[in-house]
Image (spheres, helix red, strand yellow):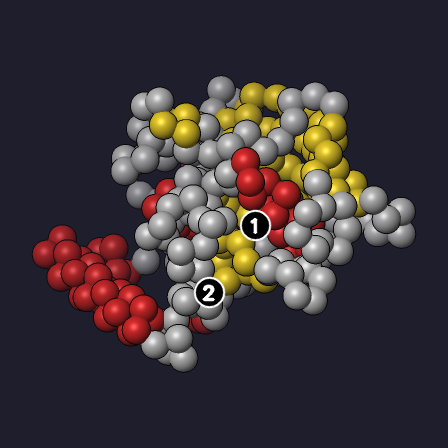
Amino acid sequence: PLFLTQPSEALIKKYRSLEEVQIQRLNAGGQDSKSEWSYSVGLDHERNRYTNIVPYDKSRIRLSVAPGFDDYINASYVALDLKEYSLRRGNYIATQGPTENTTSHFWQMCYNSVKSNNVVIVMVTPLVEKRINKCHKYWPDSGTLDLPNLDGFNQSLKIEFLSSEKIDDSFLLTNLKIIPDDPQLPVKQVYHLYYDQWKDFHKPTSIDPIILLNKYAESYLADPNDPMIVHCSAGVGRSGTFITLSYLLSCSKTFVLG
């Protein structure tokens, strides 16, 4: 893209301008629940992994629950479309790495937010880093994982392990099924792509595994209008970087790797 051809000084200046705008939005959203940038629903919520990372109210995912139950999950829709520079819109969900207590909520989101029967999950954090838990292991390595229905979900789910394989010594591809307890509802295929070599606050040692990771993830999307579900630990830094690269690699007319 043309913006990457600018001098580094210009890029730094524009980055700082974006930071200033973000601070203004956060200040406005924290002071007024009617602001376009309000994030009041997620503040101090027990389902947050980190207290300072919450979704905007306008873009947060709402869980499918019965009336009177809490529809909150720490996850946001991300739609990228640069109009004349895009081949198509990029659709994503950026979310925090599930905790033990939000594993059921995560799988309910996966099942209900994807309309086709293919669910693509890209995980770009190790489970543990420097002896700190970054993400709960929310999928089975064998057999099935039964998910309790404790929060007004419209159906109970179980996750069935099918197979797993290491791809090019870069990431682990695990095939799963989401099976609802209602036989009238569809069973959904899950492609779980787990890349664990991206440390928090760092960059990958090579872009090649990320390109391959995105290539596989894109190939499993049955409908380009369905979101690709992306998470790291907080669902912000590595997730946002991967989403940006995925959009440029798959949806941009002008992006060329140098």
Q: Residue at x 41, y 33 (%)?
A: 134
Task: Identify whether 234 is placed above or below 76.
Answer: above
Q: Residue at x 37, y 31 (%)?
A: 198
Do we see residue 38 in this rendering?
yes
Look at mark 2 in the image and give the residue it sits on: 41
Answer with the quarter of the image where residue 34 lies.
bottom left
Q: Residue at x 71, y 54 (%)?
A: 153
Q: Position of residue 240 (x, y in %)?
A: 39, 50
For the residue pair 77 and 98, the one nearer the viewer reads as 98
Do we see residue 92 in this rendering?
no
Look at mark 1 in the image and give the residue it sits on: 228
Answer with the quarter of the image where residue 190 lies.
top right
Which amino acid, mark 2? Val
Which amino acid, mark 1? Met
- What separation in Å lies between label 2 and label 1 (alpha carbons)? 24 Å
Task: Identify whether 88 is placed above or below 146.
Answer: below
